Image (tube, helix red, strand yellow):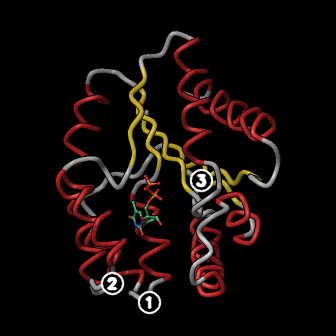
Amino acid sequence: MLIALEGIDGAGKGTQARLLVEWLRERGYRVHLTGEPTSGEIGRLLRRMLVSGGLLSRTEALLFAADRSEHLREIERRLAAGEVVVTDRYVYSSLAYQSASGLELEWVRQINSFAPEAELVLYLDLPPQVALERLGGRRRDRYERVEFLERVRRAYLELAKGENFELIDASRGVEEVHAEVVRVVSRRLEGR
Ligand code: TYD
């Protein structure tokens, strides 16, 4: 089972991913926790380039897809070994962020068409304003960032109409959000 956590920066994906993994392990599942951008060569290059800027959105989209392509080798190996894989961001980040950057959604889909759908996508939803306050510090280009993240959020909300998506209100406390994550995941596990 492949479970993806998605949401804008500051939604709490990292925390919820860790809590979910602990919860699954306590119940005897073998779980692999991973994320994108990866810590591999392409992921590291991407992170550097995102900080320094200067890449065309199109180039970024291709690099995110390339990073994912390599990531999938590990994901597929783990799934084949019967592990549950929990990933902090996946192809849906590309669909939301890269389309919010002005690229055509269909093109972003095409360059990622090698990536299998996640069985379950936990989309942690909250207003960008709240997310940025949580992140603190990073105030640079704040207005622009809020506007950009509003577009990302709208793209996610559109994606969240998909069957494999669960929309989770992430403006609540960590424990409440975790409780809902667990409810949703339990339901899916029982339905298998
Ligand atoms: P992020 O999850 O913030 O990584 P970390 O916290 O580990 O540094 O991801 C970095 C940024 O990359 C984030 O703003 C979202 C963006 N991103 C995309 O635009 N497209 C993608 O496909 C992925 C995976 C991330």
Q: Residue at x 34, y 55 (%)?
A: 37
On-image quarter of the N terminus: top left
Q: Amino acid at mark 3?
A: Phe
Please give the label number shown on residue 145: none
**Image position of 58 with respect to 157: above or below:** below
Quadrant location of residue 64?
Answer: bottom left
Asked if marks 3 and 2 touch (Cβ < 8 Å), the reply is: no
- First in sequence: mark 1 vs mark 3: 1
**Image position of 67 with respect to 105: above or below:** above
x then y, percent, for residue 110: 28, 74
Q: Which residue is mark 3?
A: 165
* Element on which disc 1 rests: loop
Mark 3: few/some/many CA within 10 Å (<14, 14-19, 20+):
many
Q: Nearer the viewer, mark 2 or mark 1?
A: 2
x then y, percent, for residue 123: 62, 54
- First in sequence: mark 3 vs mark 2: 2
Numbered label tally: 3
**Image position of 9 with respect to 140: above or below:** above
Asked if marks 1 and 3 touch (Cβ < 8 Å), the reply is: no
Asked if marks 2 and 1 touch (Cβ < 8 Å), the reply is: yes
Mark 2: few/some/many CA within 10 Å (<14, 14-19, 20+):
some
Give the left or right position of residue 153, taking residue 59 as reference. right
x then y, percent, for residue 80: 26, 27
Q: Which residue is mark 2?
A: 57
Q: Residue at x 23, y 37 (%)?
A: 74
Q: Amino acid at mark 1?
A: Gly
Q: Which residue is mark 1?
A: 102
**Image position of 57 with respect to 165: above or below:** below
